[in-house]
Amino acid sequence: MIGLMMNTPLTIGQILEHAVNIHGDKHVHTILPNGKIHRYNYATLHKRVNQLSNATVSLGINQGDRIATFVSNTFQHLELYFAIPNTSTILHPLNVRLSAIQLEMIVKEAGNDIIFVDNVYADQFANLQDKIQFNHTILINNTNQDINNKDSSLEYEQFISEEDCNFSHDIQDENCAMALCYTSGTDGEPKGVLYTHRAMYLHTLAVNHVDVFGLTESDVVMPLVPMYHAMAWGIPFAAMLSGAELVLHGSKQEQIVDLICETGVTVAAGVPTVWKKHLPEMIRRKQEINTLTQIIVGGEAMPISLIRDFEKELGIEVRHAWGMTEMSPTGTLCTPRKAHEKHSYEKKLEIKAMQGRPIPGVQIRLMNGTDNILPWDGISVGELQVRSPWTVSSYYNTEPTLEHFTEDGWLRTGDLATINSEGYIQIVDRMKSVIRSGGESISSVALETYLMTHPQVKDSVVIGIPDEQWGERPLGVVVLATKNNGDITEILRQYLSNEFPKFWLPDKFVVVDELPKTGVGKTDKQKILRMIASRKHNTNGNDELNNTYD
């Protein structure tokens, strides 16, 4: 028997409608390229979204067209988040940190012929523009005459200014695609993930659960994660549905402490690298940023020492999240249980350093091989597999394969993990990053995490390099906090020997000025491996990595 409930479609437009009707006086704050803060309320946002929707339709779009954005975290990008899906077309945020070759491949695969370009990325776009012809280029905050002189270019404000402030979107099928995001390509070429209205709406409801992001009407929320990566972890949608104020840092990440002070941010989200960079200034200005009570961390594991610094020095709660572009992207969040209140602070820190428990709607399991489900005992290590209403079932323009999806429909994450009896996940490593030495497995993630607790280490990565005797051996690459005149290899090997067996210890450590990062702030191990290989075969015989990676 079928139930007798209304079957109204779940669409992104409903999030904006709710925000305007219930929280229309709440504001969006954005740092402009000139350093000033732009503000307007949700009611104004709604009018401009309607104008943008009408203007986009005037370009002769068809349902399902993919419209690209090359834009930073700005109010204009937020307008595009709603306007493009409202027109039954597909928002396609391009990751500005990908290589020109990768971007060319992605644009051609997606079939983009309309693109919105932020002037701060004009140089990167110029490289892409030489390879791809777009029928329409809409320029945001444009001051670049080379782009502006193109016959197909339009200026954003002029593009929307004369359009009607009313737009009627009538999306009847909630399973229509609303956005296309590509993975960061850390383990290979980027792959397209095509989100639906239904999936993103349900993801928004789930992350607003009190034990997940738990955003409320009284919050001021700042997503430092780029809006071109996995829909900024869904935070813009979650903030607006809850009625929270939204703070966008544009392209000026160096000003985020100023922005916290001026706007009264209460919740912020970003990768550990960002938080470690700004920690000293945040400590110096502790009294000025006392509104900030919580940061959400994802992308990579945050070391216990850094969690301790934020909580002890600043009184800011750290909440670890884990997910993937394929999961819209949130899969788990680490919220301590009531039962943990009796634990010592150090024990609580160990829990907070884990990746957390699945959020409502997400199912997880550990697999050893194709048919052996492992127990949740906190010891057994296996591949983490997931499924949910907002997890991809296949990649864009690609038939699903057993490499990425199981026969019974679960996503193979490629992460090796343990799950304890309470459902808390601990990511051990990526399957492709585990170092196999003499038939034994070495976890690069475990070594990296422990290295980050050393006072002289600012950033670290451990990779496996070929070895004739052992197959692979670990090599450490580190950025130092201060100059060191001693034998850094011996110092760090000695430090690691307190925690790990001898065969785990890297045979050598190389000091560099900076580690290359992917577009989402993760360490780019593939680039490091390529650079190691190129140095090894350098005809001048110099295999040292003494210069900054670029």
Image (spheres, helix red, strand yellow):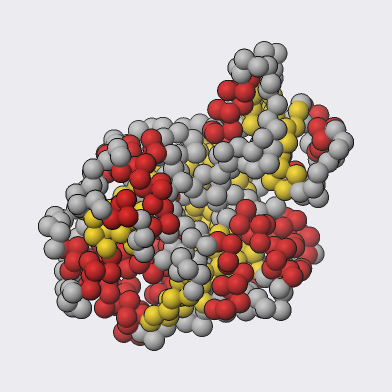
Give the farthest residue toward the top: 468
Quadrant in which the C terminus appears? top right
Q: Is residue 236 above or below residue 407?
A: below
Q: Is residue 396 above or below residue 119?
A: above
Image point (75%, 44%), residue name: 480
- Horizontal arrangement in the rendering, residue 201 relative to residue 67 (left or right): right
Residue at 70% of width from left, 52% of height from top? 303
Which quarter of the picture shows residue 163?
bottom left
- Quadrant location, the N terminus: bottom left
Q: Is residue 185 left or right of residue 288?
A: left
Q: Is residue 389 visible?
A: no
Indicate the position of residue 425 as horizontal and vertical percent values.
59, 51
Taking depth in this image into account, of 398 and 31 the one nearest to the observer is 31
Q: Is residue 492 visible to the viewer in this orientation of the structure?
A: yes
Picture mark count: 0
x, y (%) of residue 409?
36, 42
Q: Quadrant of residue 289?
A: bottom right
- Left or right position of 491 against 145: right
State whether residue 78 is above or below residue 228. Answer: below
Which of the pair 328/91 is nearer the observer?
A: 91
x and y percentages locating residue 70 in the rendered image: 36, 53
Q: Residue 334: x percent and y percent?
A: 60, 60
Left or right side of 413 for 161: left
Residue in the picture at 46% in, 49% down: 324
Q: Is residue 465 above or below residue 94?
A: above
Residue at 28% x, 65% y is: 156
